[in-house]
Amino acid sequence: MTSISRVVVPRDDIAARVKALADDIAAVFPKRDITILPVLTGALVFTADLIRRLPARVRVEPVSVQSYPGRTVRGQQCRFRLPPPEGLHDRHVLIVDDIFDSGQTMAFLRDAVAQRRPAEIHTCALLRKDRPDLPDRPADPDFFGFDIPDEFVVGYGLDFDSLYRNLPDICVLAEHARRPT
Ligand code: IMP
Ligand code: MG
């Protein structure tokens, strides 16, 4: 029995969009010298593809954020498992996440990275989830790949219970796969 109920973004669409995103991103970094902060673990696959399309000098410095759903005060619901490196002063930074949902993770990261006084910060998420229930969501990422409906997706780095990150397409899980085993 398959765990997937439907493909939301097929692999060929992802590949084409990643290439276009890479060109757009390179164009806003005039020095083409970019320090990329991928948010582990979800942004791993996206970042691996993106950096190989980027016509730029690229450094990769992973970060990891633990979020506590349910807390509503901005910044209090996230903490670092792996914080940004010290040496970001005057760097041209791009934060890369898999999905922009409530926006809390990206807002938390942007604030934390700003304290390191980089030359500039841009943000990128492969997916932007439609959340009409959150009209006051923090500012959109500067770059995003696809708008998706408000459904839980997996694949291409995104997980459910640490599984399905290796699926090549972005998919909605079947109901039975979302039940605890
Ligand atoms: P936010 O802080 O609410 O924007 O959530 C961002 C984080 O939640 C992402 O980095 C993902 O790890 C996780 N997330 C949100 N929606 C999904 C989803 O549909 N599938 C998998 N992970 C998700
Ligand atoms: Mg994440």
Image: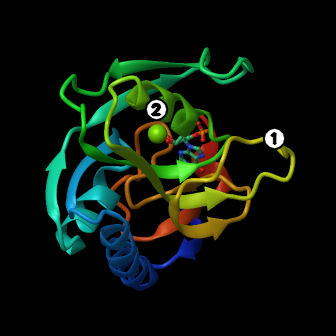
**Left or right: 173 with respect to 111?**
right
Q: Secondary structure at mark 1?
A: loop
Q: Secondary structure at mark 2?
A: helix
Scheme of image coloration: rainbow
* Front in this rendered view, residue 124 or 153: 124
The earlier-in-sequence mark between 1 and 2 is: 2
Mark 1 highlights which residue?
136
Question: What's the residue at 38%, 53% (across, down)?
Answer: 157
Image x and y of residue 10, in percent = 47, 79
The amino acid type of the residue labelled 2 equals Leu
Q: Which residue is drawn at the image coordinates 37% and 74% (left, top)?
A: 18
Q: In this picture, is 140 found above or below 26?
A: above
Find residue 30 and report its horizontal and vertical position in percent.
28, 66
> How far apart, in angstroms, are the residues tagged by discs 1 and 2?
18 Å
Could you say where residue 153 lies in the image, as x and y percent from the top left?
Answer: 57, 56
Residue 91 pos. (x, y %): 24, 42
Q: Quadrant of ligand 1?
A: top right
33 or 132: nearer the eye?
Answer: 33
Residue 2 appears in view: no
Q: Which residue is mark 2?
A: 109
- Residue type at tag 1: Asp
The residue that appears at 43% across and 51% down in the rendered structure is 122
Give 15 or 167, whichever is nearer the viewer: 15
